[in-house]
Image (tube, helix red, strand yellow):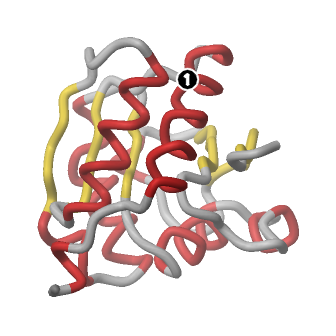
Amino acid sequence: MADFDRPLDRRGHADAREVGVAMAARGYLPALVLCSAARRAHETWTGVVAGLGTEAADLRLEPALYNTDARGYIEAIRAAGDEAGSLLLIGHNPTMEHTACLLAPDGETRLDNGFPTAGLAVFAFDVPLSGIGPGAGTLEAFLRPGR
C-alpha cells in the first residue's frame, strides 16, 4: 500500500476523537480546515469531528500538504488565512512539529517531547494569518491525546 493511502490505526482514530472532545471543551472550533489529502489525515479530521460534535468548518483537502516542508505549511496558512478567523491544519510529521517550532519562538521548548498523532498546537497571532511567518505566533496550548 502506498503511504498516501495508509489508514489510521485504531489508536489514531481514538486519539483524533479525544482531541476533538478536548477542542470542543475549550471552544477551539475552526472555521476552516486545511487537511492533507492523504487518507490518514482525512480520517483524523473525521475523528476530530466526531469528538467536536459538529462539522461546521469548511474543509479543504490540500494535496500539497502531503509532500512539503514547514515553510510550505506556513504558505498554505497564509494563502487561506484571511478567509477564516480560525484555522485548523491537519498534516504530517515531522513537518507539523517543524511548523509549530517555526511559528512560536518558544515552540521548541514547549514541544520537546515531540508532536504525537492527533496532537494540537494552538497559536495566537498579532497579525492576520496572511502575514504570519517564523516567530510570529504565541503557542497558547498544546494538547496531546491521553493527557
In the drawing, does residue 100 fall left or right of residue 74?
Answer: right
Which quarter of the picture shows residue 1?
Answer: bottom left
> How far across and down, in percent of the image, does residue 77 sit?
33, 53
Point 59% across, 72% down: residue: 97
Q: Point out the residue furthest to the front here.
A: 10
Point 29% across, 39% down: residue: 33
Q: Is residue 38 above or below residue 139?
A: below
> How far across and down, in percent of the image, does residue 146 sit?
76, 45
Number of labelled discs? 1
Q: Nearer the viewer, residue 70 or 21?
A: 21
> How far across and down, in percent of the image, does residue 26 sit?
67, 18
- Is disc 1 surrounded by few (<14), some (14 to 19) or many (20+) residues within 10 Å? some
Q: Nearer the viewer, residue 119 or 31?
A: 119
Q: Secondary structure at mark 1?
A: loop
Q: Is residue 74 above or below residue 128?
A: below
Point 59% across, 41% down: residue: 125
Point 46% across, 54% down: residue: 10
Query: In the rendered structure, which amino acid carries the disc numbered 1?
Result: Tyr
In the drawing, does residue 121 fall left or right of residue 50?
Answer: right
> How far across and down, in percent of the image, does residue 31 sit?
32, 23
Quadrant including the C terminus: top right
Q: Is residue 118 above or below residue 71?
A: above
Q: Is residue 141 above or below residue 50?
A: below
Q: Nearer the viewer, residue 10 or 111?
A: 10
Which quarter of the picture shows residue 86?
Answer: top left
Disc 1: which residue:
28
